[in-house]
Image: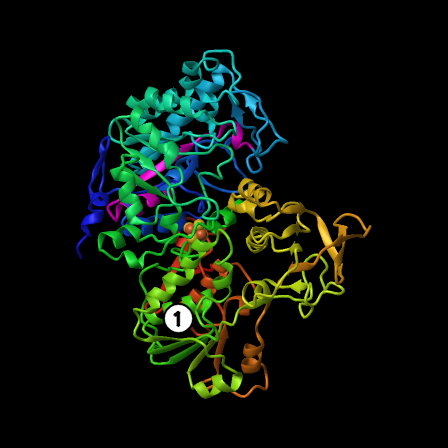
Amino acid sequence: MTTPEAYRALFEPIALGPKTLPNRFYQVPHCGVGDLRPGTQAAFRAIRAEGGWGAVCVESASISPETDQGPVHLARIWDEYDVRNLEVVADSIHEHGALAGIELWWGGGSSCSGLETRMPGRAPSQIACVGTPWVSPQEMSLADVADVLELFSLAADRARRAGFDIVYVYGAHSQGPMQFLSTTFNHRGDAYGGSFERRARFWLECLDTVRDTVGSDLAVTTRISVQDFGWGGVSNDEALAFVGLADSRVDFWDVNVGSLDWTTDIASSRFFPQNSQQPWTSKIRSQTRKPIVCVGRFTDPSVMTGALRSGQCDIIGAARPAIADPFLPNKVRDGRVDEIRECIGCNYCLSRWAQGGAPVACTQNPTAGEEYRRGWHPERYSPARNAHKSVLIVGAGPAGLECARVLGLRQMSDVHLVDAAETPGGSLSWLSSLPRLGEWRHVIDYRVAQLGKLANVQAIARRRLTSDDVREYGADIVIIATGAHWAGDGMGPATYGPIPGASSDHGHVVTPEQLLIDRKPVGGTVVVYDCEGVVTGIGICELLASQGKHVTLLTPADSPGEYARFTGEVPQVRRALATAGVAVRTETIVTRVDDSAIGVRGVYDDEETEIACDSIVLLTQRRSDDSLYAELASAGAAPVAQGAVYRIGDCVAPRMTADCVYDGHRLAREIDSPDPSRPLPFIRELRLLGNSGDTDYSRQLDTHAGPLLHRATT
Ligand code: SF4
């Protein structure tokens, strides 16, 4: 296939010092795998290389046990065992012709939890970290400075021997080298503190040390944040000055924004458009003669080529777009732009890591993180052994759409996707109509577009099926994906039962569906009771405020939209609510609902007070719409064609959109397994005592369903 003329610039090779990047697509270091799952690390990165990313980097690799960000795990390059595992990662990337990069990470005072290693962190000055203010780092002596430089040298040598092509000194996000440069974190009075040149010295010495160690065969770079937004990083002026000062020491620059507050870097689509870092990162051009990598959730090749053309950057860096679509570069190259599975900027991927280190997963790409343990390839689907069977899927929400797409790709002979609504999308249709959530619609649009290319899949709208209809339909396999609805009686996690007086049959009690689908009117003074804490309640508050309502967000949690702490959106959520004029009351439970008021009490006290309001919007919990499934699958129910009835998504249990997409994908991947209702086993990367080496794990290849992986028993 021919690369469209407009995108040719994205496929021009470029020199990175001694190495050549084969195109302008660069998967920057990003978290989500870590050192505990080396097989996952290798397979996850290799798939990105196969998909056309010219360089693929491992996430930050701690160079010493003192950089311990427990409980989450990132990569580590402490010893020869790490070298062995990382060698496999680098080899896997090289197999597809990409460069392999590794980011040497010494966190200084910003990653010194010591939760696993019990070691204190060292830092330029003894200043408690924002992230872990209950511990302070050890202030470094000059001997400590020399010691850390030695750690960089040892780690760089390991990286070289592991076969990496690109070695980073990680500074951005207020890591150790950047702390030395920062007047906030560096209060030293010796040769490493005070003037700009003295504060810059340590970072420069890190670069010199790494260069001296790896020689001229490897590309050396550093990651720098050029705008700290007042969170104690480095001012824009000094960051730019540092670029000029260090330019001769690096082969290229990896530039972003943010500091200890990195929410502007992992910018969610709710608050930041594509290429939102441009105003700051574009400024470094005047300071450097070297190639520049920029990030900005680039998913649109036109925006990418625009960034190259404008001189903002030379290379398109990406983390989330590469998670959502590992094959994005190849799709652009082959003129298949309509097949790009666009990152929606929901930050679900990040949220899992931020909750304690769960492996990477993605709303748009259910194969992310499953490449090794389940053997799932994002672009390859084997024909199903039972492809001759017909399938009826009831419900075209995220789970149903994904299930239909994968069944279509697996060449099932006849797949019908039936939905009662006018348009597909299920609950995501109305959810994505809320303020700031427009990009979430890509989950629907991508799948609808791909289904349109599959002749064996038919989408049928405006048809509500009863259990008798389903039986008469005559499909061999029936999959119920009827979703869930918000409880109308206040059932939820705060009261563990209905709230007295709450009923969505009453005019003043409203569920999200009633508000957004049925257009049920609400009064001028509204309470939004948000027990979910993700995006729905915040969106409804902003919507109602924009309509001139007096809105109070009330939540049992200690912060509004509390999941934002995992998605990196806390400052933005707070500012958005304040800007909209939404009053916020946290740690509060609704105890009763009357006609013109609600009873409330604090989470930690029993005294009830009253809040007057015209309407209350209840987001207490969702409940599965599972009656159709129950009628078809319960004991004693009349049999359906061949008796194969499954359910997926919220119909099983209301979950995040990502989990519903995954559920639909999983069932379709395993539709020809012995019992599709039960997930096949997956590899657990678990050390087996008494065994050693790779023989601890085995792969059984099931040629029809993709690799069927399991841990060997001994
Ligand atoms: Fe993008 Fe969301 Fe996937 Fe992360 S989880 S890569 S933000 S679509």
Residue 629 included in the magenta stretch of the image:
no
The residue positioned 61% from the left and 55% from the top of the image is 532
Q: Name the residue under label 1.
A: 404
Query: Residue 413, located in which quarter of the rendered image?
Result: bottom left
- Give residue 222's position: percent from left, percent from top: 36, 30
* In the displayed structure image, the side of residue 370 where residue 7 appears, left or right: left
- Give residue 61's position: percent from left, percent from top: 42, 36
- Give residue 546's position: percent from left, percent from top: 56, 51
Q: Is residue 397 above or below residue 29?
A: below
Q: Is residue 108 above or below residue 563?
A: above
| Amino acid type, callout 1 | Ala
Tally the numbered discs. Answer: 1
Q: Outermost residue, top direction?
A: 190
Q: Is residue 324 above or below residue 464?
A: above
Magenta segment boundaries in residue numbering? 85-112
Which of 401/171 is in front?
Answer: 401
Q: What element carries label 1?
A: helix
The residue positioned 34% from the left and 19% from the top of the image is 245
Query: Residue 668, located in which quarter of the rendered image?
Result: bottom left
* In the displayed structure image, the side of residue 625 where residue 1 appears, left or right: left
Is residue 157 in sight in this rendering? no
Which of 579/561 is in front?
Answer: 579
The residue positioned 42% from the left and 83% from the top of the image is 475
